[in-house]
Amino acid sequence: MRSDIHPDYHPVVFRDAITGDQFLTRSTATSSTTVQWSDGRSYPLITVETSASSHPFWTGKARVLDSEGRVERFRRKYADLA
């Protein structure tokens, strides 16, 4: 394997901006902000807007928005063609 062609792959803490949940993983992403982890070490902190702990699909809180009756509107629009 050639040296000096791969990006730096290091431990990073990701924090969900909505729930505040954090997890430690490895990434090539960097940040000047750091956070103290439970092992006593300081790691770069990357804040993300959505993670599995706040995404509606993964939390089971997905909502179906059909305020205008899209199905009924479709049926009315194309009823003449059937």
Image (cartoon, rainbow, N blue to C red):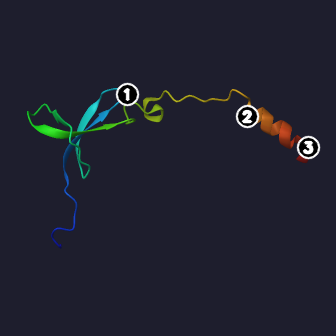
Q: Name the residue under label 3.
A: 80
Work out how far the residue at label 2 is from the one at label 1, CA to CA, in angstroms.
Answer: 31 Å
Q: Nearer the viewer, residue 20 or 64?
A: 20
Disc 1, SS: loop
Of mark 2 and mark 3, the one earlier in the sequence is 2
Q: Which numbered dot is residue 18?
A: 1
Indicate which disc, 2 or 1, sits on the residue closer to the N terminus: 1
Kindly identify the amino acid type of the residue bearing the numbered disc 1.
Ile
Q: As rendered, which of 9 and 75 lies closer to the eye? A: 9
Disc number at residue 44? none
Residue occupying image coordinates x 49% and y 27%: 61
**Hey, which residue is sitting farthest front in the picture?**
32
Q: Which residue is drawn at 79% across and 35% down?
A: 73
Q: Mark 2 points at which residue?
A: 70
Q: Distance between the residues labelled 1 and 3?
A: 47 Å
Three-letter code, disc 3: Asp
Residue type at mark 2 is: Arg
Q: In this view, does 44 lie to the left or right of 61?
A: left
Residue 23 visible (yes or no): yes
